[in-house]
Image (tube, rainbow, N blue to C red):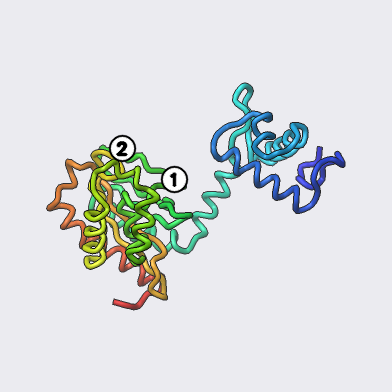
Amino acid sequence: MSTKLADSADKSAPGGSQTLLRGLDVLDVIAKGPVDVARLAAALGLSKSTAYRLASTLVERRFLVFTPREGYSLGPKLMQLGYAARNQTALVRVAEPHLMQLSSVTEDTVHLAMLDQRKVLYLNIIPGQRRIVISSRIGERQPLTSTGLGKALILNRSEKEWEQFYIEEGSKHRSQQSFAAWLKRMKDYRRQGITLDLEENEANIRCVAAPVLNEGGDIIAAISVTGHAQNMTDDRMRSLSEDVLHTAQAISADLGYSGG
């Protein structure tokens, strides 16, 4: 069999761009977890033979791997491409030295994230020096309204949009606070230019976050310092706010933002 998706000798296989699109659909399905050929075919609405041909070609090109009794899962080629894309992103490159400096000063884990389909997408993580495990991973997505990063990413949105985000993720708050209380905090955060996560997203984990702006003054990312609640007292979070805000402003300036 040819190693190119479009070169299948079977006439029943889709051709050209349709084959490419179906190959991408295969990756989307398997990104959610390993699947066997029967479940893959059912998810894509294809015959088992067509699903097998697509998956086998992707295995040949190392985009997928096949494990007996488990099925297909994402392969090493995607990891290589993911790291290449991350390293080529101007935002990540520009921000990284600032994030490393912030992590060195605070000794805590530092995150860089952006908004992706109404979720927080982690772009870079600089581990802290403290012996505390933070469960976040590059490429992971988290809620907006219960994370410091998420709140920072929507700090410039209208109150109506805030309410929509809150309603969509209402179950995440687990009745910790009403929308009125959350809205009041968001208004305070907007005045201060920083946001907090007070164990709203994960027990015993707190963070201080701030938005990153592009040359036009739009929020394109956010950064945060994250640590265990025992080290992130209210007083320390207040003192960290200045460091986080200063770092976010420095990254923004390097990206072309010249406002106040």
Q: Nearer the viewer, residue 64 or 164?
A: 164
Q: Amino acid at mark 1?
A: Glu
Q: Residue at 19%, 47% (x, y): give it.
A: 232
In which quadrant of the rendered view does residue 131 lie?
A: top left
Residue 31 placement (x, y as % from top left): 56, 40
Q: Is residue 83 above or below residue 256?
A: above
Which secondary structure lies at badge 2?
loop
Mark 2, mark 1: which one is toward the viewer?
1
> In the orientation shown, which residue stands out farthest toward the top?
69
How far from the left and from the top, in percent, is residue 229? Answer: 20, 42
Give the CA distance from mark 2 to mark 1.
Answer: 16 Å
Image coordinates of residue 116 in percent, x first then y, are 47, 55
Position of residue 228 in the picture relative to residue 52 (left or right): left
Which of the image's four quarters has the N terminus? top right
Helix, strand or loop at mark 1: loop
In-image side of 74 versus 1 (left or right): left
**Residue drawn at (48%, 54%), measured in percent from left and top?**
117
Q: Earlier in the sequence, mark 2 or mark 1?
A: 2
Q: Residue tagged by mark 1?
A: 140
Task: Write down the quadrant of residue 36 in the picture.
Answer: top right
Instruction: In the rendered view, tell whether residue 241 sits above or below residue 40.
Output: below
The crowding category of the residue bearing disc 1, from other C-alpha atoms within 10 Å (few below 14, some 14 to 19, many at least 20), is few
Nearer the observer, 8 or 183: 183
Residue 98, image x, y percentages: 33, 60
What residue did someone put label 2 on?
133
Q: Residue at x 22, y 65 (%)?
A: 192
Q: Residue at x 34, y 59 (%)?
A: 162
Q: Who is closer to the viewer here, 195 or 260?
A: 195
Cβ–Cβ under 8 Å for marks 2 and 1: no
